[in-house]
């Protein structure tokens, strides 16, 4: 019983030590085009023209606004 208790206490202390070092700023919003490079090309999606961006990984996408929520999200393009 003592071994189980000691093992549990050591495990909890290691978990607590790992969780103390991280600080995450939730107030700062990331700009979705912060690292994006516009290509100069235009894509037509749902009858509207959108500029095409290239991500840092080399993938092409457009920024679309959701009709329901109004949030901006990336729509990745498959055949570019």
Image: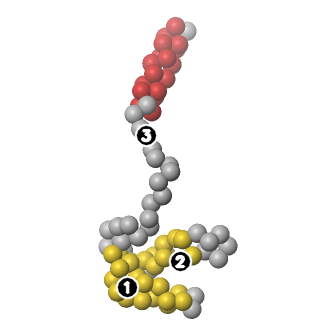
Q: Residue at x 57, y 92 (%)?
A: 47
Q: Residue furthest top?
A: 2
Label 1 secondary element: loop
Quote the CA–CA distance across marks 2 and 3: 31 Å
**The C terminus, quarter of image:** bottom left
- The relative height of residue 20 versus residue 65 in the rendered view (above or below) is above
Mark 2 or mark 1, which is nearer the start of the sequence? 2
**Residue holding disc 3:** 23
Label 2 secondary element: strand
Image marks 1 and 3: residues in contact by CB distance under 8 Å: no
Residue 55, image x, y percentages: 36, 71
Residue 39, image x, y percentages: 33, 83
Q: Nearer the viewer, mark 1 or mark 3?
A: 3
**Residue holding disc 2:** 64
**Residue holding disc 1:** 80
Q: Nearer the viewer, residue 14 or 48?
A: 48
- Left or right for 71, reference 11: right
Mark 3 or mark 1, which is nearer the start of the sequence? 3
- The relative height of residue 50 versus residue 29 in the rendered view (above or below) is below
Residue 11 makes an appearance in the image: no
- The relative height of residue 37 versus residue 43 in the rendered view (above or below) is above
């Amino acid at each position: 019983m003592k071994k189980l208790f000691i093992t549990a206490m050591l495990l909890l202390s290691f978990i607590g030590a790992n969780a103390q070092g991280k600080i995450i700023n939730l107030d700062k919003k990331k700009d979705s085009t912060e690292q994006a490079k516009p290509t100069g090309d235009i894509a037509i999606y749902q009858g509207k023209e959108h500029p095409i961006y290239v991500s840092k990984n080399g993938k092409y996408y457009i920024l679309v606004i959701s009709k329901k929520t109004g949030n901006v999200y990336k729509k990745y393009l498959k055949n570019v």
